[in-house]
Amino acid sequence: MADDGFFQRAYDIVRQVPEGRVTTYGQVARMMGEPRKARYVGFAMHSSPGMKGGVPCHRVVFADGSLAPGFAFGGPEKQRRMLEAEGVGFLPSGKVDMSRFSWEA
């Protein structure tokens, strides 16, 4: 696949996100030097091997703290449970509290 190199670079960054923290698709894209490719990061996360491949893609959320409606490994409810199990807190709106749980690389 033509995107394998891009996907692997995205996975390498997401593997660095510590438990109990989240990052955004846009942050990953910027860290890759591809600031306009947040959507491609989303494609990479959707295609990732998940935790089996050591890619904690559940730790990647939208910039406003929203969860991915198409979370590849069980939907946003599963993503929320995984994040809560790591200690990530949510606002009453259902979004991740980005002011407290955003990862600063």
Image: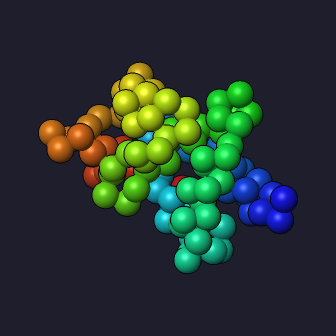
User: In front here: 62 or 32?
Assistant: 62
Q: As drawn, is 47 to the left or to the right of 87?
A: right
* Residue drawn at (56%, 75%) of the image: 35
Q: Is residue 93 visible?
A: yes
* Residue drawn at (56%, 56%) of the image: 42
Name above or below for residue 21 compared with residue 10.
Answer: above
User: In front here: 54 or 103?
Assistant: 54
Q: Quadrant of the N terminus?
A: bottom right
Percent coordinates x, y for residue 58 in the rendering: 51, 38
Name above or below for residue 6 compared with residue 50.
Answer: below
Percent coordinates x, y for residue 38 in the rendering: 54, 66
Q: As drawn, is 61 to the left or to the right of 66?
A: right
Percent coordinates x, y for residue 48 in the rendering: 68, 43
Q: Is residue 86 visible?
A: no
Name above or below for residue 30 compared with residue 61.
Answer: below
Residue most extreme to the left? 92
Q: Quadrant of the C terminus?
A: bottom right
User: In front here: 96 or 40?
Assistant: 40
* Residue drawn at (43%, 28%) of the image: 78
Quadrant housing residue 7: bottom right
Its colouring scheme is rainbow
Name above or below for residue 66 compared with residue 6.
Answer: above
